[in-house]
Image: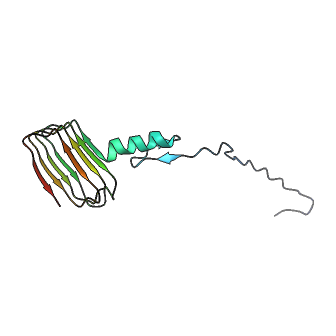
């Protein structure tokens, strides 16, 4: 209960970010303020298989969503891209089996030896 002679004072503190810095959030939650660094990071971590040995590497449907994909310097691997891709580049792969689902662009295969390719 308050009498009419009591006064209440409320103080508000408002924090406003005036820097207006654009933030880019990568698939894994890493935050970037530079768009080119963000794009480079996403390409390397989400759309590249690099330097893998004796591994089964799979990208499930919905995980590529029409982005380009890079496969490079892998050996003795089974690689499955089970989502639609843009351009695919495959370089320096040996003794591996590679399955590529639908691709809307070119697929470049360079310097690969003893590999089996299945391309939809």
Residue found 13% across the figure and 43% down from its top = 77
Q: Nearer the viewer, residue 96 or 117?
A: 117
Q: Quadrant of the C terminus?
A: bottom left
Q: Quadrant of the N terminus?
A: bottom right
Locate residue 94, reporting x and y percent. Answer: 11, 39
Locate residue 31, reporting x and y percent. Answer: 48, 43
**Farthest-out residue, right:** 5
Residue found 64% across the figure and 46% down from its top = 20
Locate residue 4, reporting x and y percent. Answer: 91, 63
Residue found 9% across the figure and 45% down from its top = 115
66 left or right of 25 in image:
left
| Residue 30 position (above or below residue 81) | above
Q: Nearer the viewer, residue 35 or 120?
A: 120
Q: Total label count?
A: 0
**Farthest-out residue, left:** 114
The coloring applied to the image is rainbow
Q: Nearer the viewer, residue 81 or 114?
A: 114
| Residue 48 position (above or below residue 119) | above
Residue found 15% across the figure and 42% down from its top = 55
Locate residue 11, reporting x and y percent. Answer: 79, 50
Q: Nearer the viewer, residue 119 or 38?
A: 119
């Amino acid at each position: 209960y308050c009498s009419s002679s009591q006064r209440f004072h409320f103080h508000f503190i408002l924090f406003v970010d005036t820097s207006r810095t654009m933030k880019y959030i990568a698939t894994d939650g890493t935050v970037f303020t530079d768009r080119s660094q963000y794009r480079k990071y996403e390409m390397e971590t989400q759309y590249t298989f690099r330097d893998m040995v004796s591994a089964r590497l799979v990208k499930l449907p919905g995980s590529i969503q029409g982005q380009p994909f890079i496969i490079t310097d892998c050996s003795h691997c089974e690689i499955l891209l089970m989502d639609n891709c843009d351009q695919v580049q495959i370089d320096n792969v040996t003794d591996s089996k590679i399955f590529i689902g639908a691709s809307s662009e070119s697929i470049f295969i360079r310097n690969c030896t003893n590999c089996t390719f299945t391309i939809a």
